[in-house]
C-alpha cells in the first residue's frame, strides 16, 4: 500500500511538474512575443529620431543659408522703408543703419507718423520697432524710431 501511495504521489508530482512546465513555457512565449513587439517599437522610434534629426539638420542648414542672404534682404528692406517715407509724406532728416538696427529721424504731421508706425508694425518682416520718440516743434513733429533686426 505504501508503494502504491508512493507511486501515486510520484505520478501526481510528475503531472504537477508537467503542468508547471507548460505554464512556464506559455509565459515564456508571451514574454518573447512582448520582447519582439518592444524591439519593433524601439527600431521604429529610432527611425523617427533619425528622420527628425535629418529634418532638424536640414532646417538648420536652410536657416544658415537664409541668414547669409539676409544681409542683402536687410539692405533691400532698408531701401524699401526709406522709399515708403514719400508715400507717408514724411521728411527724412537723418538715418543710420547697421546689421542689427536702423535708426530714423523724421519730421511730419501726426497722421503721417501714425500711418508709418502702422506700416512698420504690419508690413516690415525684418525690422521690429524697438524704440520711438515724438517731439513737437511749432507746426512740425520730429519722430525718432529705432528698428531692431529680428532675424539676427
Image: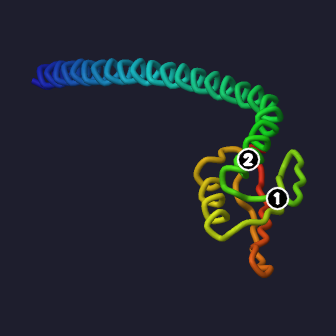
Q: Which residue is mark 2?
A: 81
Residue 10 found in image quarter:
top left
SS of the residue at dot 1?
strand
Q: Which residue is mark 1?
A: 104
In front here: 39 or 21?
39
**Furthest-front residue in view?**
139
Q: Position of residue 85 (x, y in %)?
A: 73, 52
Residue 120 found in image quarter:
bottom right
SS of the residue at dot 2?
helix
Classify residue 29 as left or right of residue 67. left
Mark 2, residues whose alpha carbon is within 10 Å: few (<14), some, or many (≥20)?
some
Q: Who's the residue at 13% across and 25% down the image?
A: 5
Q: Who's the residue at 59% across and 58% down the image?
A: 118
Q: Position of residue 141 (x, y in %)?
A: 75, 73
Earlier residue among tags 1 and 2: 2
In front here: 129 or 4?
129
In front here: 94 or 69?
94
Quarter of the picture holding the N terminus:
top left
Q: Who's the residue at 87% across and 45% down the image?
A: 99
Q: Who's the residue at 88% across and 55% down the image?
A: 95
State how far apart marks 1 and 2 are (Cα): 10 Å
Mark 1, residues whose alpha carbon is within 10 Å: few (<14), some, or many (≥20)?
some
Amino acid at each position: 500500500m505504501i508503494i502504491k501511495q508512493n507511486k501515486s504521489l510520484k505520478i501526481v508530482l510528475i503531472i504537477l511538474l508537467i503542468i508547471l512546465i507548460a505554464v512556464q513555457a506559455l509565459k515564456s512565449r508571451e514574454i518573447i512575443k512582448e520582447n519582439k513587439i518592444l524591439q519593433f517599437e524601439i527600431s521604429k522610434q529610432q527611425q523617427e529620431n533619425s528622420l527628425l534629426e535629418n529634418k532638424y539638420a536640414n532646417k538648420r542648414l536652410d536657416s544658415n543659408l537664409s541668414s547669409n542672404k539676409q544681409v542683402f534682404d536687410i539692405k533691400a528692406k532698408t531701401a524699401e522703408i526709406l522709399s515708403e517715407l514719400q508715400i507717408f509724406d514724411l521728411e527724412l532728416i537723418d538715418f543710420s543703419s547697421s546689421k542689427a538696427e536702423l535708426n530714423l529721424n523724421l519730421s511730419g504731421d501726426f497722421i503721417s507718423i501714425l500711418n508709418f508706425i502702422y506700416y512698420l508694425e504690419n508690413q516690415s518682416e525684418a525690422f521690429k520697432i524697438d524704440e520711438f520718440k515724438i517731439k513737437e516743434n511749432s507746426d512740425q513733429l520730429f519722430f525718432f524710431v529705432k528698428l531692431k533686426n529680428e532675424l539676427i
